[in-house]
Image: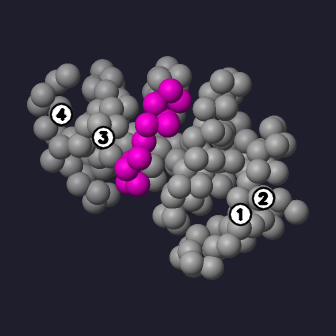
Amino acid sequence: MNSEYYNQIAKSTAHRKSRDDNKDFIFANPDYLKYLLEIAFNSKDKNHHKACWILELICEEKMDLFLPFLDKFCETLPHYKNDSAIRSISKICLFLSNSKKYTLTENQEEKIIETCLDWLIESNKAANAAYTMRTLYNLGKKHTWVNEELKVLLQRDCSYQTPGYKSAVKDILKRLK
């Protein structure tokens, strides 16, 4: 691990400028992506969520840089427990499930589906749930059992949830009919 780069990640913040600066650093220095991923994939590292924030922006703009690491990403998915990391990681899953350009392997799809189902059951964060619902809906077009399971999960009582969560549930249930 490059300690200078690690400190750069540790000092980063959730502010968009900080995340963009770190993303742009990777675009200018792609050899550092492996260090960023080392932090992001280590859910025990206290700064892994910051690396995930940056990774999300990288994947949004240049998914090609990330694709060689997709198997490792999928293996790591079940280990994420930090809501801030899950928000970014679930958004990356959404990008992957939406892509017409990249095809996931059957194993990668299974890992994403399993983890998203777990996150949907365990999390009550609206953004995380919305990204996972949409990812599952997209993958459910190919794996019909996923949308059946999704429908059951979304029809449970969500009266205690936030308006954002309820809105996402309503949208997905409408699409599932």
Compared across the picture, whether 57 is left or right of 99 comes to left
Name the kind of residue labelled 4 in the image: Tyr
CB atoms at circles 1 and 3 under 8 Å apart? no
CB atoms at circles 2 and 1 under 8 Å apart? yes
Name the kind of residue labelled 2 in the image: Lys
- Label 2 vs label 3: CA separation? 32 Å
In this rendering, the answer to whether 153 lies above or below 70 is below
Q: Is residue 170 magenta?
A: no
Q: Earlier in the sequence, mark 2 or mark 3?
A: 3
Dot 2 corresponds to which residue? 151
Which mark, residue 6? 4
Q: Which region of the structure is painted magenta?
A: 73-85
Dot 3 corresponds to which residue? 48
Within-10-Å neighbours for mark 2: few <14, some 14–19, many 20+? some
Q: Position of residue 10 (x, y in %)?
A: 18, 43
Compared across the picture, whether 172 is left or right of 12 comes to right
Q: Earlier in the sequence, mark 1 or mark 4?
A: 4
Q: Position of residue 102 (x, y in %)?
A: 65, 29
- Label 1 vs label 4: CA separation? 40 Å
Q: Image point 56% across, 74% down: which residue? A: 161
* Quarter residue 54 falls in: top left
Q: Image point 81% across, 67% down: which residue? A: 174
Q: Earlier in the sequence, mark 2 or mark 4?
A: 4
Q: Earlier in the sequence, mark 1 or mark 3?
A: 3
